Image (cartoon, rainbow, N blue to C red):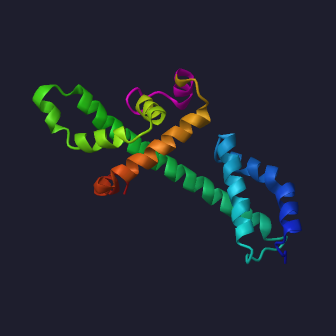
Amino acid sequence: MLTLNEHTFEKLFHEYYSFLCNYAFRYIADQQIVEDIVQRFFITLWEKNHLSVTSDTFLPYAYRSIKNSCINYYKAENCRNDLIAVLAQEWQQQLEYDGEEADDFIYKKEVQLALHKLPPKTKKVFLLKCISELTYKEIAEVSDISVNTVKYHLSEAFRIMKEELKELSFLFFLIFF
């Protein structure tokens, strides 16, 4: 049985970090996300100081934990992309409506208010993704920022939009479940 003291933790980290990153890379092709997942695994391992692991059970535990984290990442990413797609579709419909038909856009006011809550750069990235349907790389090039910054802004936009549109949670429930 391994006692998870500082020395043992450091040994496990140095011995398995790269190995576990390579394992996670089988599931996720983004090196930054892979490193985040593996780092979070080790942080959680450290925080669970009561966890009993042996030299025989560490790797299976690590594999299972990292695989589950990768699956959870994909679930969250799909959910985020679904929300973006729904909002983009409704926003696109709003832009296409003329005159009196604009009143037919069901969530027009709510979406507009939520969009106004986004910081300017975040709003720009969000609209480039939703309206222009650009890829992360294209948004990065157009906005002269890194792909990771694009991901950050989209994540932030998703968080804010979700918070601002929480009254419409029934809609998201119907869409995602």
Vertical order, 58 against 105 (above or below): below
Vertical order, 173 against 102 (above or below): below
Judged left or right of residue 112, residue 46 is right
Locate the C terminus by quadrant.
Answer: bottom left
In the rendered image, which quarter is residue 132 located in?
top left
Image location (x, y in percent) of residue 144: 57, 23
In depth, the one of 70 and 109 nearer the eye is 109
Residue at the extreme top: 142
Taken as a whole, is the magenta stretch helix, strand or loop? helix
Numbered range of the magenta stretch: 130-142
Query: Residue at image x 33%, y 50%?
Result: 165
In the rendered image, which quarter is residue 57 located in?
bottom right
Query: Residue at image x 55%, y 34%?
Result: 150
Q: Is residue 99 magenta?
A: no
Residue at the extreme left: 100
Image location (x, y in percent) of residue 93: 25, 32
Whether residue 61 is visible to the viewer of this picture, yes or no, is no
In the rendered image, which quarter is residue 41 located in?
bottom right
Locate the N terminus by quadrant.
Answer: bottom right
Image location (x, y in percent) of residue 172: 34, 53
Judged left or right of residue 83, residue 21 is right
In depth, the one of 115 and 57 nearer the eye is 115
Whether residue 113 is visible to the viewer of this picture, yes or no, is yes
Query: Residue at image x 52%, y 21%?
Result: 142
